């Protein structure tokens, strides 16, 4: 795997927020890791450890204080201008004056796709997330889970090579959440995007990803990268397999090891 | 995505729990008529109370026919010639004046809205200009209209403008402020993630404005336009006085207040027509809003 060129390469990245006056907050320190094509990477860690900050750095919504983020062999900024990634936030962030079709077409409009191509893509994407009958509805007429599926369809509509997701299922109930995880995996299987998925749920991270990047807080750093070699396609049975629980334990221990270290230092 | 954009069905408590519901439009009309009847009853009731007690209790306004003419004599005055031997009934004369004034108000409203909107867009794009200009924008509204109006008229006559343009400018002066403030608020209303979403598409500033900020601002802008609609009528009426324009409601109000003693009901009649003009203007703006902004997004009034 390591002979491939990485989709995302993060080198010695630190982020310090200037809080005004003499207050500075080191959110991330010396982050190093690579993400390879077709990877599904989960960023896992306690609240406030800098997961969102790291994701936003990859997406060039903020820039690092030091170090460099390369996406597809170019600086993250250039990758953003080249529309290399799609974003999904914790909230669906649909524009409520647009229909579902209109929302899915938003990036395509911004990128000046011709009208017929836009419509075709929107249909295709809604079919992918199984919402084809809801194209003419407005966001408020959809449930939270459906809205989040629209957000995923919207992010995939322009075929970005990288999908950045920040706790996309955080606001959903457990049952919907598990169904959405299955759907996401099936969508990921059908497209060949690379996914970076922020979560603070250990089972979610293990179930979805091919690698879990474990982070610790204050300052945020990477404490371990755990390969999840559970067979694919993953299913309901995966969740009940002993390997699944082993991996969960492994991840949990990695998180805990760090906690103990933090407490003793 | 915006918590302050609340669902508003604009019903005035006429929705019965039993499910006996009238259409929203009809409900509004019924509410309006009921309130109108209540006001008439209050007015006449006050007069009646005055007549019955015959001065034995102190009343803030004298309930006699000069201070407070009967509603029916006000309505009656509308259907009598304004002057003895005159051709047209008062209603026709006032309606003609109202249409004249409305044209000036509409011109002012349009100018003021365009200027107000443009300022809002400029301010949202430049903090520096906002900081620099906003104090003047605010200050402009604290200068009394009474002082501004004659000045504009004098400038207008120096520059050989037609008289109504000065009136329209005075009306625009009252109109632009709420539009600027609300446009600015509306353009800033999208939450940060909605903006970040656009940034993640590498959208240009203009695309962010047209596809996000402007649609998000529409409910706010319409709230301002409703305020501005009434303000533009007031601006036009006040502006007509120093301009010496004889054809509008301003002159009618002035004339009938001169001759108040001989016919108080005529002044009241022209006040009612002036108020109606404002109401009609606001209703027109509301109808346009209804076409442009879906109900779920209209701001509660
Ligand atoms: N724009 C900012 N300005 C200042 N400080 C910030 C900013 N964004 C994040 N931080 C700080 O950086 C740290 C990491 O924040 P971040 O949002 O990345 O955490 P997180 O891991 O995503 O947490 P959660 O799981 O709760 O979402 C926090 O201490 C936060 O206060
Ligand atoms: Mg976060």
Image (cartoon, coloured by chain):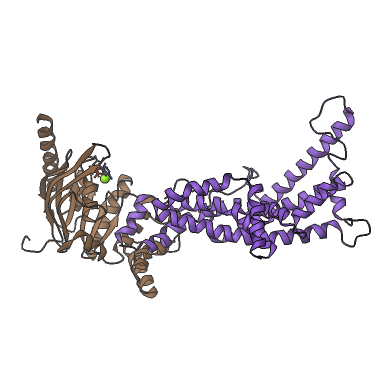
Spot the residue most to the front: B158
- Foreground residue among A180 and A238: A180
Residue B86's spot in the image, x, y percent?
Answer: 91, 60
Colour of chain B in the rendered structure image: purple
B249 relative position to B15: left or right: right
Direction from residue B23 to residue B120 in the image, left or right = left
Percent of width and height locating residue B54 = 90, 28
Q: Position of residue B28 (x, y in %)?
A: 67, 50
Whether residue B98 is visible here, answered yes or no, is yes
In the displayed structure, A220 sits above or below A86; it is above
Q: Is A32 left, or right, of B206 in this rendering?
A: left
Which of the 4 quarters of the picture holds residue A35? bottom left
Q: Residue furthest right?
A: B85
Q: Would residue B230 be visible to someone looking at this image?
A: no
Residue furthest toward the left? A3
Colour of chain A in the rendered structure image? brown
Residue A160 horizontal/vertical position (percent) = 25, 64
- Tell me the quadrant of ligand 2: top left
């Amino acid at each position: 795997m390591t002979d491939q060129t990485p989709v995302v390469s993060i080198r010695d990245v630190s982020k310090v927020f200037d809080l005004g006056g003499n207050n500075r907050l080191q959110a991330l320190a010396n982050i190093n890791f690579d993400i390879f094509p077709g990877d599904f990477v989960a960023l896992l860690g306690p609240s406030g450890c800098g997961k969102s900050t790291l994701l936003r750095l990859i997406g060039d919504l903020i820039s690092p204080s030091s170090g460099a983020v390369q996406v597809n062999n170019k600086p993250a900024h250039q990758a953003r201008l080249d529309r290399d990634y799609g974003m999904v936030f914790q909230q669906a962030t649909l524009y409520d004056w647009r229909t579902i079709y209109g929302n899915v077409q938003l990036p395509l409009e911004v990128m000046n796709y011709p009208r017929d191509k836009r419509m075709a893509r929107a249909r295709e994407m809604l079919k992918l997330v199984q919402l084809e009958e809801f194209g003419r509805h407005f966001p408020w007429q959809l449930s939270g889970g459906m809205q989040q599926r629209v957000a995923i369809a919207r992010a995939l509509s322009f075929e970005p090579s990288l999908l950045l997701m920040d706790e996309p299922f955080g606001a959903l109930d457990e049952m919907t959440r598990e169904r959405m995880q299955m759907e996401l995996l099936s969508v990921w299987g059908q497209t060949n995007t690379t996914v970076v998925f922020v979560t603070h749920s250990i089972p979610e991270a293990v179930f979805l990803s091919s690698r879990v990047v474990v982070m610790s807080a204050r300052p945020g750093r990477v404490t371990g990268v755990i390969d999840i070699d559970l067979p694919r396609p993953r299913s309901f049975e995966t969740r009940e397999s002993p390997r699944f629980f082993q991996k969960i334990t492994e991840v949990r221990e990695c998180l805990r090891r760090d906690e103990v270290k933090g407490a003793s230092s | 995505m915006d918590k302050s954009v609340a669902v508003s069905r604009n019903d005035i408590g006429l929705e019965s729990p039993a499910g006996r519901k009238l259409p929203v439009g009809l409900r509004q009309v019924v509410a309006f008529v009921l309130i109108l009847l209540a006001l008439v009853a209050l007015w006449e009731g006050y007069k009646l109370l005055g007549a019955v007690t015959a001065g034995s209790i102190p009343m803030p306004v004298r309930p006699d026919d000069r201070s407070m003419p009967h509603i029916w004599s006000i309505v009656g005055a509308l259907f009598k010639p304004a002057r003895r031997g005159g051709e047209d009934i008062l209603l026709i004369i006032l309606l003609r004046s109202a249409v004249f004034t409305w044209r000036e108000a509409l011109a002012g409203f349009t100018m003021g809205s365009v200027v107000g909107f443009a300022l809002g867009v400029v301010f949202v794009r430049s903090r520096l200009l906002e900081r620099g200009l906003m104090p003047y924008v605010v200050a402009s509204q604290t200068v009394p209209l009474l002082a501004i109006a004659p000045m504009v008229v004098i400038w207008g006559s120096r520059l050989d403008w037609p008289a109504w343009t000065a009136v329209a400018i005075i009306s625009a002066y009252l109109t632009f402020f709420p539009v600027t403030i609300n446009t600015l608020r509306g353009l800033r209303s999208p939450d940060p993630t909605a903006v970040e979403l656009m940034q993640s598409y590498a959208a240009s500033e203009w695309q962010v404005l047209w596809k996000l900020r402007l649609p998000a601002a529409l409910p706010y802008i319409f709230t301002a336009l409703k305020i501005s609609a009434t303000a533009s009528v007031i601006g036009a009426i006040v502006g007509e006085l120093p301009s010496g324009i004889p054809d509008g409601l301003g002159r009618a109000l002035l004339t009938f207040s001169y001759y108040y003693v001989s016919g108080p009901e005529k002044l009241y009649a022209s006040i009612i027509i002036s108020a109606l003009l404002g109401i009609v203007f606001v209703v027109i703006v509301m109808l346009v809003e209804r076409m442009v902004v879906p109900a779920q997004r209209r701001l509660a009034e």
